[in-house]
Image: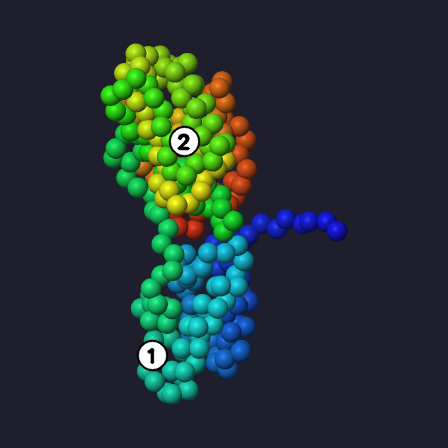
Amino acid sequence: MEIIDINGYTVEEKIQIAIKHLIPKQLDAHGIKKEHITFSNAIIEQMIEEYTAESGVRGLEKAIAAVVRSTAKQVAMEEEYDVKVDVEKVRKVLGAPYFIKDKFIDNSVAGVVTGLAWTSVGGDILFIETSLSKGKGKLTLTGNLGDVMKESAVIALAYLKAHADDLGVDVRAFDRWDMHIHVPEGATPKDGPSAGITMLTSLASAFTQRKVKIKLAMTGEITLRGKVLPVGGIKEKYLLPNVPACRKLF
């Protein structure tokens, strides 16, 4: 036997699957016609983002079925209702959102950089934070990081030290300040080399006090020569369902 890897659907693909297959299927199953209920692309996307966390569409179909059942009841009871499904109806039927993902943040503080991550259920973002305190150059890493990600931080710091003059950093600063790199949501394990360029940028931002542009996310493994290696999972990382503003790659 052979193992065949199948990538998950993007949000855009899920929306089209819902429109062409899932919604007609549920309408037929509940005995109502398409003029009885209308789903906009925005509402379908909201249901995907807030009520599902999957590579497929099974959870989405269940959510659509619940909304269609509610409408079928209203049609059968001859109740007045709005044909167009809106946020209020989704909340009433499905309840409070199950998933609330991070949005991009205003990088108003130097040392904070947005990175891209690839998970089993699609793209997501993570924040790399670097803080400096008076010390002797100690590097501290927190945030439930794996060995590969820790190595990326060490490489990033080594490159920054070797090219301090090019980046406008006083080399004496590395002996006067302790560095603390943190990746929030410590309960979630994180690993992989793709955060290298993000960590380097975070360190450089902290030392130079230059803020990173807002609505900018980056990904890529960094080498000691400062080369960013080819990145995997670009499709999944780029099509972030909850972060339409972070669709620029460094």
Q: Secondary structure at mark 2?
A: helix
Which amino acid type is shown beneath numbered disc 2?
A: Thr
At a point 40% along the width and 43% down the height, the residue shown is: 125
At a point 75% along the width and 51% down the height, the residue shown is: 1
Pick out the residue farthest to the bottom: 77
Residue 142 placed where, x, y %?
A: 37, 34
> In which quadrant of the rendered view does residue 144 lie?
top left
Marks 2, 1: nearer the viewer: 2
Residue identified by numbered label 1? 81
* Quadrant in which the C terminus appears: top left
Which amino acid type is shown beneath numbered disc 1?
A: Tyr
Q: Nearer the viewer, residue 15 or 165?
A: 165
Q: Nearer the viewer, residue 18 or 62?
A: 62
At a point 31% along the width and 14% down the height, the residue shown is: 175
Q: Earlier in the sequence, mark 2 or mark 1?
A: 1
Residue identified by numbered label 2? 198
| Label 2, label 1: how far apart the Cα atoms are | 49 Å
